[in-house]
Image: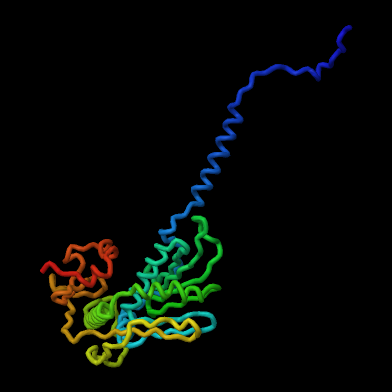
Amino acid sequence: MSSPRRSHREKISPYRYTPSLAVAKHKARQKNRERLQLSSQFTPNRLTQGKSTVTNYSLNPTKAAQKMIDATEQLNVQAEFKRGTLVMKFSPAAFLMFHKHTLAYYEKSSRLTAISHFKRDKNNLIVEESLSIKPITNDKVGRRQVYRINLYKTAFSVEANGREIKDFIKNDLHEILSTLPSIEFLNNMNTAIQDSCKSFLSDQDSNNWIQSDNISSHSAIVPTSSRDENDPLLTNLNRTQNLTSIETIVATDSTQSHKNCASCSENIIDFEFIMCITCEEKFHFQCQNITSDQYKSMSIDELEQFKCTQ
């Protein structure tokens, strides 16, 4: 019996299989998946820098220095709740330490991360910093912000708000405040800041870029020896009430403070200095062979127990 005839269209021409195209597509898909995994990986102990905006003004150094002097005179750091926002006002030393310890807290946190956004003046000086706090889930940063912390560097104030602000007050803020340095350390730091600013203002006539007509009269400086040394540095926040207060002290010993570096005798017009626990003198970092990175990595105990090489 003869086989039925088949049309030419049903005939299959044999060909040699070459898997190069399929393999190439598979490798491309695998590479894309690996790239997506790498981009989604997050290191919890690393802070993230966000956007930076520029204001339409330039910071007035004379007004900023006088404002800093006035802030060192205050005896209390006040905290209150305004329309869902926690507002805290610090002395300059307490503000600098609070800022430093807040960044350190979220850098080490395994459940939260901080994304920093900066606002700069026309001279590129940072006047405000905003920390967007977001949760970490499965080594990934959540999209939704839990709360925001705004730090105003010229007003020495902090504002915190968000949908989980109560958790910030009960947990994060409590831990941050507990790591602040001792009262004596903040006292000495505030006194040094006050002396540096007064030295800067007294030398303003010799600086061509400072105009004397911008200087306004201010009240006399409150003697540091008259301040109460027994007040607590920072009280615990009231967890049952929205209105709360945080007390701090900017008192200092009645020892003589110096405006110049004890090593090079040059004026200290900024905060790039360190104090010796033995002689209670101020020194430029470079005069003690300390770099800025080394200073930032020093612990509070190392700062408080620093001894000069004089």
Q: Position of residue 119 (x, y in %)?
A: 43, 70
Q: Nearer the viewer, residue 195 or 30?
A: 30
Q: In the drawing, does residue 138 fall left or right of residue 205?
A: right
Q: In the drawing, does residue 107 fall left or right of residue 138?
A: left
Q: Quadrant of residue 172?
A: bottom left
* Residue 243 position (above or below residue 272): below
Residue lying farthest to the front in this orientation: 240
Residue lying farthest to the left in this orientation: 310
Q: Is residue 204 visible?
A: no
**What residue lies at 60% left-to-right and 29% top-to-bottom?**
21
Q: In what quadrant of the picture does the N terminus appear?
A: top right
* Residue 251 position (above or below residue 148): below
Q: Nearer the viewer, residue 123 or 232?
A: 232
Residue lying farthest to the top in this orientation: 1
Q: In what quadrant of the picture does the C terminus appear?
A: bottom left
Q: In the drawing, does residue 283 fall left or right of residue 7?
A: left
Q: Position of residue 60 (x, y in %)?
A: 35, 78
**What residue lies at 26% left-to-right and 73% top-to-bottom?**
271
Q: Position of residue 293 (x, y in %)?
A: 28, 61
Q: In the drawing, does residue 128 fall left or right of residue 194?
A: right
* Residue 164 position (above or below residue 194): above
Q: Quadrant of residue 88?
A: bottom left
Q: Position of residue 306 (x, y in %)?
A: 19, 69
Q: Which color scheme did the rendering employ for the protein?
A: rainbow
Residue lying farthest to the right in this orientation: 1
